[in-house]
Amino acid sequence: MNPSGLRGRPPHIDSRGDTPRGTPVPEFSRIVLAETLDEGGSSLDIEADESERSLLAERFGLAGLKTLTGAVRLTPQEGCALVRLEGAFRAEIVQTCVVSHEPMEATLEGFFERLYDIVPEPAEGSDDGNIDIDAEDPPEAAPEGKIDVGEAVAEQLALEINPFPRNPELSFADYSTDPDDGEKTESRGGPFPALAKLRKKPK
């Protein structure tokens, strides 16, 4: 699952700690020190353990997170002031169907890129509040040259999770949307005939 097919000397990596001062430790933390990266780039594979998966499942509102693996490549840019991250991840998740409330499994995969500034400039106080929608996203700050590739993978996983999971084999026609039913029950007509009646109702 190497995103670039290239590998360099493995960088120095810390798990569960050594985050920048004042920064809380995320559930799945893998800190890479920018100063340990090869000039041509360094690659590594990471995997969340059972405890980390349990914490991430709670964070993302999942019924379960069976596996989470990632492959990242970090390449210094522009005189090592910036570091580009190219990543890929794969996760096996368990969610609860929003219709039947039954568990359902899904496999998610994704590729992503990020740019980190290991020497961030101080924020200027002359911001006029205007937003340039055409401007490129600024690099993410990496205080003390520490890049948390585990958190980057976790954040990308969160973007790929369906917030309203529904079993594709399940039909909404089998369920009523009438709040008086209490529990969802079988419905013959569904919501659309009722909507048509409302439109035809005389004023």
Image: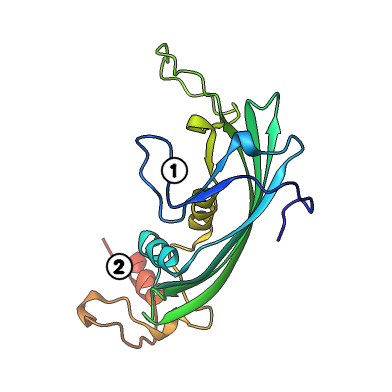
Question: Residue flagged by tag 2: what amino acid is it?
Answer: Lys
Marking on residue 18 = 1
- Seen from the viewer's position, the closer of residues 101 and 156 is 156
Residue ID at (72%, 38%): 38
Quarter assignment of residue 130? top left
Question: Residue flagged by tag 1: what amino acid is it?
Answer: Asp
The answer to whether residue 4 is left or right of residue 110 is right
- Which comes sooner in the sequence, label 2 or label 1? 1
**Gap in angstroms between the C-alphas marked 2 and 1:** 66 Å
- Seen from the viewer's position, the closer of residues 4 and 201 is 4
Residue hosting label 2: 201
- Seen from the viewer's position, the closer of residues 178 and 56 is 56
Q: Between label 2 and label 1, give the one nearer the viewer.
A: 1
- Seen from the viewer's position, the closer of residues 47 and 191 is 47
Quarter assignment of residue 109? bottom right
Residue ID at (72%, 53%): 3
| Above or below for 121 versus 5 | above
Residue ID at (68%, 49%): 10
SS for tag 1? Answer: loop
Q: Give coordinates of residue 159: x percent, y percent.
A: 51, 54
Quarter assignment of residue 5? bottom right
Q: Is label 2 in contact with label 1 (beta carbons under 8 Å)? A: no
